[in-house]
Image (cartoon, grey):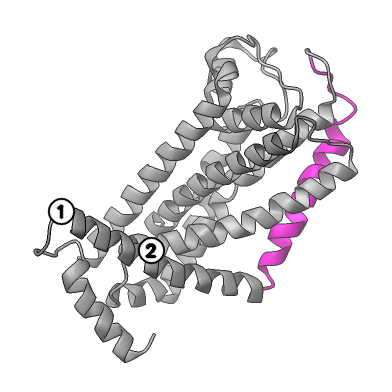
Amino acid sequence: MTTAEQSGRRSGDTAAGPDAKAGSGLREWTAEALWAVSDAAVLTRRNLIHTVRLRELWPFMILQPLVFVLLFAAVFGGSISLPGGGSYRAFMMAGTFAMAVAFVTYPSAVGIAFDMQLGLMDRFRTLPIHPAAIFIGRTLGDLFRMAISVAVMSICGLAVGWRATAGFWHGVAGFALLAAFGFAMSWVGAYLGLAAKSLQAAQSLPMLWLFPVTFVSNVFVPTQHMPDGVRFVAEWNPVSSVATAIRFQFGNPHSFNDPNSFPARHSVALTLVWSALLTLLGVFACTRRMRAVAA
């Protein structure tokens, strides 16, 4: 960004920023939204270029999904039978997709913490950049990386026998639900990275809750044989909602203790609600913390 551009943006900040006094509320809101979108586009491009050029990220994007699919298909594939019948590998694939998008929290947290450690966030604070744009650029870049991982997992899943049998548009809807939930989890990771005191803390924080959340769920096993308290948590778990919703969209088997329970019958709606709620909380928390630090 040139000095002239920075000067222009600063003058625009006076007119369109949150402290602007002139204009109606609607014009101020529109101007701030355009400001955030414009800055987010620049920062998203920066993160995409960073993804392509930083080769250390590629093993995480490609090898980890392959390991997930092959490991769980080989270890559990022939030893677990579903109470409702059907292929366990088809059941397992949706759970693996859900777990992979939940784990996008980890690179998001580390990426933000790494930018803070390098002083890049301090540099951003000195520029007329909308606070939310910094995190929108990060989360959209993470969404691109997540799409590559899901594509690799899909190809690997096809190789081990998984099929989406409910039709093309249901398949598209399933991947759209994955993208919505992954985007929301990326916002959670962005906040954790911003709140962490060090890069080491950012590497540890997501794992403290990701493993319990992803494994106390119906990601890899049905909920029929879980104790009552654990089963209740597992069936209302947002990761279970995503896994069940995409099983429905892909035409894969799913199994709840009670197939007529609310989380079983409304998994798509619950996934959308969880995704919207986590995204809104992430936007609010990240923007507020960024403004508090900059004040």
Q: Residue at x 13, y 65 (%)?
A: 20
User: In the orientation shown, which residue stands out farthest toward the left?
Assistant: 21
Relative to 72, 185 lies left or right: left
Label of residue 61 in the image: none
Q: Give the image quarter of residue 37.
A: bottom left
The kind of residue tagged 2 is Val
Give the vertical position of 194 relative to 102 (above or below): below
Residue bearing the label numbered 2: 37
The kind of residue tagged 1 is Gly
Relative to 31, 55 lies left or right: right
- Measuring from the top left, give residue 245's x and y in whole percent: 62, 29
Q: Give the image quarter of residue 82.
A: top right
Relative to 46, 288 lies left or right: left
Q: Residue at x 28, y 77 (%)?
A: 126
- Measuring from the top left, give residue 290's x and y in whole percent: 30, 61
Q: Assess disc 1: are there few (<14), some (14-19) or many (≥20) residues with their C-alpha within 10 Å of its C-alpha.
A: few
Residue 137 in sight in this render: yes
Which quadrant of the figure contains the C terminus? bottom left
Q: Residue at x 66, y 17 (%)?
A: 223
Q: Give the image quarter of residue 121.
A: bottom left
Residue 200 in sight in this render: no
Q: Residue at x 32, y 63 (%)?
A: 34
- Measuring from the top left, give residue 212's x and y in whole percent: 58, 34
Disc nearer the start of the sequence (1/2): 1
The number of discs equals 2
Q: Is residue 72 magenta?
A: yes
Region rendered in magenta: 54-82
The residues bearing labels 1 and 2 have C-alpha atoms spaced at a distance of 18 Å
Label of residue 25 in the image: 1
User: In the orientation shown, which residue stands out farthest toward the bottom?
Assistant: 3
